[in-house]
Image (cartoon, grey):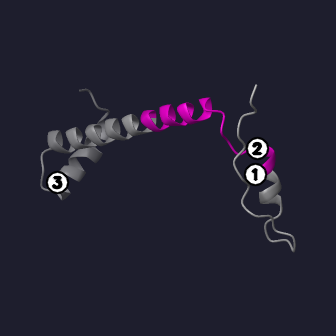
């Protein structure tokens, strides 16, 4: 893997502080990045599945609720909207 001199210097510094090889540090960093990316993709897919059910809190309800914060008439947390039967 090709690294810029500045990035290589940073990697070497971390490796030295952790008493590990630069290769080991780089492997762990890449693994952490890929794990986080996979988790993000799973979360997005799960959100799409939920959205496809048509059960949601409308943007309008959330905005009304947020606009009421710190007022004398603060609204309760908005409820879920269910799809209409067709």
Question: Which quadrant does the N terminus fall into?
Answer: top left
> Residue at label 2?
59
Residues shaded magenta: 41-61
First-in-chain label (3 vs 1): 3
| SS state under label 3 | helix
Nearest to viewer (mark 3 / mark 1): 1
* Rendered image quadrant of residue 83: top right
Most distant residue in the front direction: 85
- As drawn, the label of residue 62 is 1
Label 3–label 2 contact, CB within 8 A: no
Q: Residue at 79% of width from left, 50% of height from top?
A: 61
> Residue at label 3?
16
Q: Residue at 37% of width from left, 34% of height from top?
A: 38
Q: Residues within 10 Å of mark 1 (few under 14, many from 20)?
A: some
Q: Residue at 72% of width from left, 43% of height from top?
A: 81
Question: Which quadrant does the C terminus fall into?
Answer: top right
Q: Position of residue 60 (x, y in %)?
A: 81, 46
Does the stretch in magenta take in 5?
Answer: no
Report whether 40 appears left or right of 14. Answer: right
Label 2–label 1 contact, CB within 8 A: yes
Q: Main secondary structure of the magenta part?
A: helix
Residue 82 to residue 72: above or below? above
The reply to whether residue 60 is in sight is: yes
Q: Position of residue 26 (x, y in %)?
A: 23, 40
The reply to whether residue 6 is in sight is: no
Q: Position of residue 16 (x, y in %)?
A: 16, 54
> In this view of the protein, which residue sits in the foreground, 61 or 21?
61
* Rendered image quadrant of residue 29: top left
Q: Residue at 28% of width from left, 37% of height from top?
A: 30
> In this view of the protein, which residue sits in the foreground, 46 or 37?
46
| SS state under label 1 | helix
Q: From mark 2 to mark 1, how far is it between C-alphas? A: 5 Å
């Amino acid at each position: 893997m090709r690294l810029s001199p500045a990035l290589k210097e940073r990697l070497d510094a971390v490796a030295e502080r952790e008493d590990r090889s630069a290769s080991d540090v780089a492997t762990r960093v890449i693994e952490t990045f890929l794990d986080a990316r996979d988790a993000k993709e799973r979360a997005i897919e799960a959100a799409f599945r939920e959205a496809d059910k048509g059960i949601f809190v409308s943007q309008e309800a959330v905005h009304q609720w947020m606009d009421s914060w710190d007022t004398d008439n603060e609204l309760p947390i908005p409820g879920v909207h269910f799809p209409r039967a067709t």
